[in-house]
Image (spheres, rainbow, N blue to C red):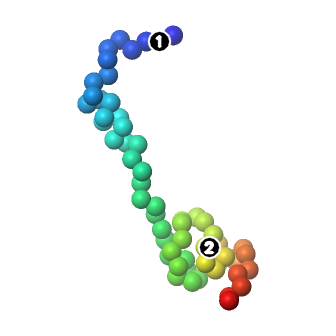
């Protein structure tokens, strides 16, 4: 089994870990109702995706 030849320095370790940050959630505006939604996902407020109604939402 391969074994590292040298100890990984704190600098190299931390530079590698710097890429593992949590990114901010990207939101886009729903074209039918204007509510924020995830890109390429169905709108949870009105139930549409790409102009088609996927789920009928009851307005209470």
In which quarter of the view is residue 54 placed? bottom right
As drawn, the label of residue 44 is 2
Q: Give the mark, 1 or 2, whose residue is nearer the N terminus.
A: 1
Give coordinates of residue 30: x percent, y percent: 55, 77
Q: Residue furthest bottom?
A: 60
Give coordinates of residue 36: x percent, y percent: 51, 74
Q: Residue furthest front?
A: 60
CB within 8 Å, label 1 to label 2: no
| Callout 1 secondary element | loop
Q: Is residue 43 above or below residue 5?
A: below
| Other-residue count near label 1 (Cα within 10 Å), few / some / many at <14 / 14–19 / ≥20 | few
Q: Is residue 19 above or below residue 47?
A: above
In which quarter of the view is residue 11 placed? top left
As drawn, the label of residue 53 is none
| Circle 1 residue | 2
Give coordinates of residue 58: x percent, y percent: 71, 85
The quadrant of the image that shows the C terminus is bottom right
Give coordinates of residue 56: x percent, y percent: 74, 80
Residues at marks 1 and 2, CA–CA distance in whole angstroms: 49 Å
| Callout 2 secondary element | loop
Given residues 54 and 50, the one toward you in this image is 54
Identity of the residue drawn at 61% across and 78% down: 45
Q: Does residue 37 appear to the left or right of 46 in the view shown?
A: left
Whether residue 50 is visible here, answered yes or no, is no
Q: How many discs appear?
A: 2
Whether residue 41 is visible here, answered yes or no, is yes
| Other-residue count near label 2 (Cα within 10 Å), few / some / many at <14 / 14–19 / ≥20 | some
Q: Is residue 40 above or below residue 17?
A: below
Identity of the residue drawn at 39% across and 14% down: 4
């Amino acid at each position: 089994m391969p074994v590292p030849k040298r100890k990984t320095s704190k600098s190299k370790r931390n530079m590698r870990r710097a890429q593992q940050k949590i990114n901010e959630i990207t939101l886009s505006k729903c074209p039918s109702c204007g509510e924020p939604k995830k890109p390429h996902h169905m709108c949870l407020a009105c139930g549409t995706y790409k102009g088609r109604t996927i789920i009928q939402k009851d307005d209470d």
